[in-house]
Amino acid sequence: MKVNDVNKWLQEVEHPAKGDRNLVELGMVENVEVGEDFVTVTLGFAKHRDPLAEYLIGSAKAAIIRNAPEGTNVEVKTVIKSEAAPKKKPGLDLGFEEVENIKHIIGIASGKGGVGKSTVSVNLAVALARLGYKVGLADADVYGPSVPKMTATEGLMPDAIQEGDKEVIMPLEKYGVKWMSIGYFAKPEQALIWRGPMACNALKQMILQVRWGELDFLLIDMPPGTGDIHISLVHDIPMEGAVIVSTPQDVALADVEKGVNMFRNESVKKPILGLVENMAWFTPAEHPDEKYYLFGKEGGLKMAQKYDIPLLGQIPIVQSIRESGDCGEPAALLSRPDGLAFIALAEKLAGKLTF
């Protein structure tokens, strides 16, 4: 393993805001150290608070891990080119200026993956917008960002503007909602191999460095499960409470209990605003009055009653919801039964909050 090998691996990391030129082409690789069982790379940034800093750091580390011998210790350091001495990593010393004009910041969580949390998040955001609220959604599901696909905004890049020594990111706007996702800064097929602290810093930067403006709601589509990323988001973002999404299936409900206990833990203490039972039943398009309980009946309702949590809504499995997500036109845009289910969910959530 040689320095030239590492530089070759770093050519796999393209800068999405620089015409897909790689780190080596852009002269961002300041130094490479290679030992028997370690690689240390120093990346140079032109300024503090670069909105893509954490993404590029994580991608560089992932590229080396993919190619280096197993067990190699990889470290990626940063330096600000305009300064003589390295400072702490850009993007971590952020205030709450960009979220001060948001009335309600709500996390959308799930105890496990595969329950349709992102589908509910996107459609809830659109439904709230249809009700006349000012809405934003931050896609913090760092390991599976799906908002770009579900909103047909894949391939678009948010603009960044410089204000003195501060750079802010402008969210994309579509369907009356402001969208931000880590997926806008990565290729669809690229896996984000990030450790917990790196992911936490990237997500904090993605939310607090965005020019959201005045909003009634900012929904945060959180990663599935419970862990350090969730605790970091709850501590670092002024989140008012959480909505938990689950299916009626026993295995999903078991993980709901973990999520409830996390939010009610003494170190977290965030109210659970309600539970959404997704995939509550299957209704065939040709028989709209029939219900088939594929994952069990009213499991979400029973869980809500057990933990004294409001049941905000029950969303059925219908083909149109899946098709709407795949083509980037959320079901909540239309006044069909599936869209109206999300409107009802939005009304119930908004009715619980004070404006």
Image: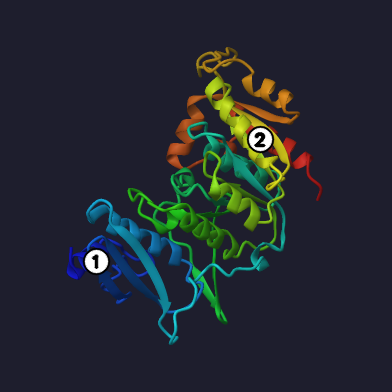
Q: Is residue 55 above or below residue 219?
A: below
Q: Quadrant of the N terminus?
A: bottom left
The x, y position of residue 224, in whole percent, is: 52, 40
Comparing 39 with 28, the one in front is 39
Which numbered disc flags the more N-terminal residue, 2 or 1? 1
Residue at 50% of width from left, 70% of height from top? 160
Comparing 180 with 140, the one in front is 140
The image quadrant of residue 25 is bottom left
The x, y position of residue 310, in whole percent, is: 74, 31
Total count of labels: 2
Separation (CA) of disc 2 from disc 1: 46 Å
Badge 2 amino acid: Val
- What residue is disc 2 on? 260
Q: Secondary structure at mark 2?
A: helix
Q: Is residue 50 left or right of residue 310?
A: left
Q: Is residue 111 above or below residue 27?
A: above
The residue positioned farthest toward the right in the image shown? 354
Badge 1 amino acid: Gly
Residue at 52% of width from left, 44% of height from top? 223
Q: Is residue 8 above or below residue 301?
A: below
Which-is-in-front pick, marks 2 and 1? 1
The x, y position of residue 247, in whole percent, is: 56, 26
- What residue is disc 1 on? 35
User: In the rendering, which numbered label is found on residue 217?
Assistant: none
The image quadrant of residue 168 is bottom right
The residue positioned farthest toward the front in the image shown? 36
Instruction: Please tell me how crowded label 1 is: few (under 14), some (14-19), or many (20+) other residues with Cα within 10 Å.
Output: few
Q: Is residue 247 visible?
A: yes
Residue at 51% of width from left, 17% of height from top? 284
Instruction: Please tell me how crowded label 2 is: few (under 14), some (14-19), or many (20+) other residues with Cα within 10 Å.
Output: many
Comparing 192 with 135, the one in front is 192
Q: Secondary structure at mark 1?
A: loop
